[in-house]
Image: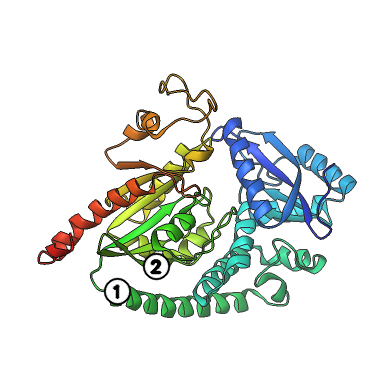
Amino acid sequence: MIETKKDQETCVLVGLVTKSQRKEHLEEYLDELEFLAKTADAHCLARFTQSLEHPDNKTFVGKGKLEEIREFCHDRKIDMVIFDDELSPTQLRNIEREIKDVKVLDRSNLILDIFASRARTAHAKTQVELAQYQYLLPRLTNMWTHLQKQKGGIGMKGPGEKEIETDRRIIRDKISALKKDLAQIDKQKATQRGNRGAMVRVALVGYTNVGKSTLMNILAKSKVMAENKLFATLDTTVRKVVLQNLPFLLSDTVGFIRKLPHQLIESFKSTLDETRESDILVHVVDVSHPNFEDQMATVSDTLNDIGSGTKPTIVVFNKIDALEFPNPDDVEPNFDEDNPTIFNLEDLKRTWMAKHSDLEVVFISAQERTNLEELRDVLYEKVKVIHQERYPYNNFLY
């Protein structure tokens, strides 16, 4: 068995194969859930899957599977069980009653915990705290006993452990107060965006952990935190960028993810305003991810939901340095005899990825600084078109 850090919590993951969620999709979702757990500094020791037509209303996975999970957790002294889907208050209560003395989290609770640990500014902290209280409210009855047994750790950050003695009325009052605070902060943010004038605005969007912050640091020559963890960036960062004497504003936004808790979507609407009000989107994609097409679809669906789906967009396929050799049916690459798994940019430009839509497509590696000049050129041309329309008398800049 792999040794864990002395103070690192251990966990097992649980997911369902259903009519709407095939086994191969579940494996990918559990991979992502394990990455979320790792981001929260937990070590995954096992996975449990169950095939049902739909989740069991009482225990999510059924009584027999739940007993199997309980025995494993007690034998191995596991700290927590994490479910890949959001549990209803009834399911959560029944599962905790059956497993006993083991923390039970669902995907939403885990994501909220990560957001709580990564929130730095007053804006992000208020957004996360509001989402946590909204998640807590319907689960308040059983959260009391649950939180009395557990002392800190993953899933326990934020308002939960401080509000054991509260009732629903106090929670609702707190939600109301946080909404007022958030409305005031949003108003200030809107004023800040208005004060930026009519400069062309470009927003980096994409799935979480695809390299947006790394690209932001390169283009803007800034020092935005970038690391190989999910949700490294919560607050929207805006920097002024100048390409060939042409200035514009570049923003780095929070990454999207599947099954993002609806409480967070509501709370982070103001953060998404930066995307809604941008002139150009740069959709960054981790092309080395085995299911990057699904991630692209998730981002596109979210952009459509917030009314940004028709904006001028550049698709940037990042991390080409980590891309495995393509399907021979897709392209006939020029083999490098010394390293046959590497292929050049011209090979990539002949793949279906380069022609998947009418959008501009650029292949880069932000980490290795590969093909960034082409990206700058494409971005410059896009910004120039809008700048010329907005400032027809500033042609001396081009």
Residue at image x 29%, y 42%?
Answer: 359
Q: Is residue 132 above or below residue 344?
A: below
Disc assigned to residue 196: 1
Residue at screen point 29% across, 75% down: 194
Q: Residues within 10 Å of mark 2 (few under 14, many from 20)?
A: some
For badge 2, the amino acid type reads: Val
Number of numbered discs overlaid on the protein picture: 2
Q: Can residue 23 be seen in this snapshot? A: yes
Q: Residue 16 in the image: state x and y as whole percent.
A: 64, 38
**10 Å neighbourhood of mark 1: few (<14), some, or many (≥20)?**
few
Q: Quadrant of residue 65?
A: top right
- Residue that extends furthest to the front in the rendered view of this protein: 338
Residue that carries the numbered disc 2 in the rendered image: 238
For marks 2 and 1, the one nearer the N-term is: 1
Q: Residue 367, position in %: x, y?
A: 50, 49
Q: Quadrant of the C terminus?
A: bottom left
> Looking at the image, do the residues carrying marks 2 and 1 touch, with CB atoms under 8 Å apart?
yes
Is 122 placed above or below 73 here?
below
Q: Secondary structure at mark 2?
A: strand
Compared to residue 62, the image places residue 36 above or below, namely: below
Residue 12 in the image, given as x and y percentages of width and height: 75, 46
Query: Which is more toward the observer, 254 or 146?
Result: 254
Which structural element holds mark 1?
loop
Report the quarter where the N terminus lies. top right
